[in-house]
Amino acid sequence: MYRTTDILTNTPNASLSEAGYMVINVGPQHPATHGVLHLVITLSGETIINVEPHLGYIHRSIEKMCESLTYRQFIYTTSRMDYLSSHINNHCCALSVEKGLQIEIPDRAKYIRIILDELTRLASHQLWWGAMAMDIGAITPFFYAFREREMINDIMEETCGARLTMNYMVPGGVMFDLHPNFQKKVKEFIAFFKSKINEYDEILTGNIIFQNRMKGVGIISKEDAISYGCTGPTARGSGVSCDVRKLYPYEIYNRIEFDEIINNGCDSFARYEVRMQEMKQSLKIIEQLIDNIPEGDFQAKTKTVLKLPKGEFYTRVETARGEFGVYIVSEGGTTPYRIKFRSPGFSNLSALNHMAKGNKIGDLVAIMGSIDLVIPDIDR
Amino acid sequence: MQTLTNRAKLVERKPLSFIERVYLWNILKGLIITFSHIFKKKPTIQYPEVKRTFSPVFRGLHVLNRDEEGRERCTACGLCAVACPAEAITMEAAERLPGEEHLYREEKYAARYEINMLRCIFCGLCEEACPKDAVYLSETFAGANFNRESFVYGKENLLIPNPKTDPEGYAKAKGN
């Protein structure tokens, strides 16, 4: 692994400084990098020549750790990866174990899972909205976003038992039944948030100062977005149709009416618009389901010790950042032989260099904000 | 643009009107929104003075339960330690001697029961695994201390107060 000093003195191209270029480090503890992300930026004046992300500062070898955990236990390590959509990560793991065991889960559990997934997506997008606005210099949206996110956190705490690492999904359903207040609180939240999302639009989306910061920076074409493996709003902002909920519907998404949002803008503002519209779609999904949660079991009957048959299993879900995949190789034992997580953040980050090249250094945070990076997800 | 599958909804960009392009008006609009919040209800909670109530499923620090007669429920079967993904729980079993029936519920009990709160990820699997309802996660959540050793909670920290000798403490720990 590199040390910061190594990079500064032993840059591959020794003539960089002679050519008038400057190499600077952003991070790994820089306030604008959302965590321990380390970017080595080559600059010519103010223009970015090259951005090189260095990973490894928050590597916890989760994939290796999962090989010694049972199929019930390994789910909980994924909450620590993309902590903002931990529910959806857990969902994907539970789905892949269910696929291996061929368990049919009850309808009630499916409804609960989808509602909580969409609430998680909303909470994640709210935090992204606030954090991105703060990155480019607007402090107030951060507080507004956290005010609304607090309501979701309260719902999660009441229903799942924790605010961030929910651990609510188990193979076969959900851990325990819904709290009696759940439906009432979710409806309250939807009514409240519908008025607030207009405020979001008024204060930030329609603001010309904000738009001038976002429009025309971080451009990535449709072909490039596909070739870099971008997924989620990052790719949909470039016109790629890649929503797993539509393309490979899991649980009951094929029965729900919602739109996949794409935008042909290809720049940071297009990705921003996609996420804002997605929040409205998430509200729409929750509204359809919240009154129709069927009665019944919340968990299918499973054995105490789960043993997956020999083989390979892959499932994917749409997290707030893109496609999240779990690939399990099983040898027939109680623990997986190998687990691979396909995290959306890693592929999206790989496109950062392409997006940032040629832009000014001040735009870098606007581009990074529009990709919505969560570092523990990239570097697990 | 015609999409291949017609699954997607295309969002196009509208051109800005003149008033939207004026910087000063946008600054004023932002100020109006932020200033209007001065007169609204504050969402903050004054934490140490005011505390929120938690739901019964909240996963906080662990508690070792006793039955109504004040006897320890734990039989040191080790199922919680096996279920723990973080390997935070260790225990040592011991056999109940004659004359200790008022202390332990069954013939076997945990002589040493330790949970490393720094390792614990508060997933609640120990609570799920326990066949005797002996360990459960309480609504206390903020453990603070000066050194690492004091985060290894032994039986003296984990056990709920005895309902016979300390009914008030027991009721408080039960949360009602």
Image (tube, grey):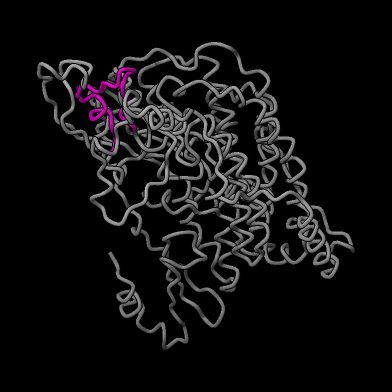
Q: Is residue A369 visible?
A: yes
Coordinates of residue A107 in the picture (x, y in percent): 54, 15
Q: Is residue B97 found left or right of A160 in the rendered image?
A: left
Coordinates of residue B120 in the picture (x, y in percent): 32, 40
Highlighted magenta segment, given as a residue range: B63-86
At 56% from the left and 73% from the top, the residue drawn is: A361
Q: How many marks?
A: 0
At 38% from the left and 40% from the top, the residue drawn is: A341
Coordinates of residue A326 in the picture (x, y in percent): 39, 35
- B81 is within the stretch colored magenta: yes
At 43% from the left and 66% from the top, the residue drawn is: A29
Q: Is residue A12 visible?
A: no
The residue closer to the viewer here, A66 or B41, is B41
| Position of A272 relative to A254 (above/below) | below
What is the residue that sits farthest to the front in this orientation? B165
Coordinates of residue A110 in the picture (x, y in percent): 53, 21
What is the residue that sits farthest to the bottom in this orientation? A18
- A350 is within the stretch colored magenta: no
Q: Is residue A378 found left or right of B52 in the rendered image?
A: left
Q: Is residue B160 found left or right of A185 in the rendered image?
A: left
